[in-house]
Amino acid sequence: MARKRALVVIDVQNEYFGGGLPIEYPPVEQTLPNIARAMDAARAAGVPVVVVQHTAPPQAPIFLRDTPNWALHPEIASRPRDHYIEKHMASVFAGTDFADWIARNGIDTLAIAGYMTHNCDASTVYHAAHAGLHVEFLGDATGALPYENAAGAASAEEIHRVFSVVFHSAFAVVMGTDEWIDALASGAESGPEGPYASNQRALARRRQAA
């Protein structure tokens, strides 16, 4: 039975393009065109597109409603969408009508694009997986930025890579935009590899390197 997908385009807002949270890896020069291609391919294939926009509290330094950095990037704002969600927490499900919209439309698969890999994307991936949905994470249409805090430091590349590996172990199929577009036409399916298989592969690589 063919999957009933929706493409979820999360928080592609100007804040991530020269605003307070510039995405570093993969660079927006690569990821933004892939997000746009995914939206166009979804439209051509009859896959509904959900566009999500984050709004922070008035005292926050970022994502302030009705400011230029809060606005959707023009590449996203100019494209058609089937559903719009304004959210105030990380997960697209939290405090929104998203779960009801999914149920009304018989959606069983979510394809995740947009920002950030480790925050709103991750929260939505986990929420969807726990709700029993199949999840596809478009790794080259998403992105991260570096962090440093009391727990340590990590580069944007490290964060994006590690979250992608964890997603593919249990929560989502990590795939490229080209692969996802091909799957729309072919109906090809795959799933997460599983924590045990992912761990065994890592251990085998370690033994080979010893």
Image (spheres, grey):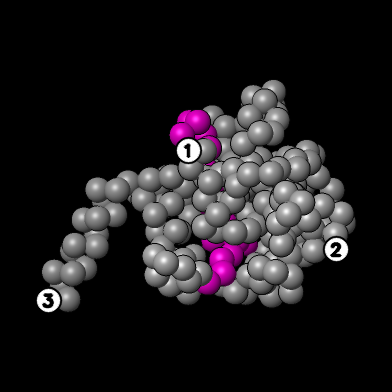
Indicate the amino acid at tag 1.
Ala
Identify which residue, 136 or 114, lies in the foreground: 114
Q: Residue 68 shows which numbered tag?
A: 2
Dot 1 and dot 2 residues touching (CB under 8 Å): no
Q: Residue 129 shows which numbered tag?
A: 1
Is residue 134 covered in magenta? yes
Q: Nearer the viewer, mark 1 or mark 3?
A: 1
Which badge, 3 or 2, is on the more N-terminal residue? 2
Give percent across and percent down for residue 23: 63, 70
Q: Quadrant of residue 45?
A: top right
The residue stretch that appears in magenta: 128-146
Which badge, 1 or 3, is on the more N-terminal residue? 1
Indicate the amino acid at tag 2.
Pro
Q: CA distance from mark 1 to mark 2?
A: 33 Å
Which badge, 1 or 2, is on the more N-terminal residue? 2
Question: Label 1: few (<14), some or many (≥20) within 10 Å?
Answer: some
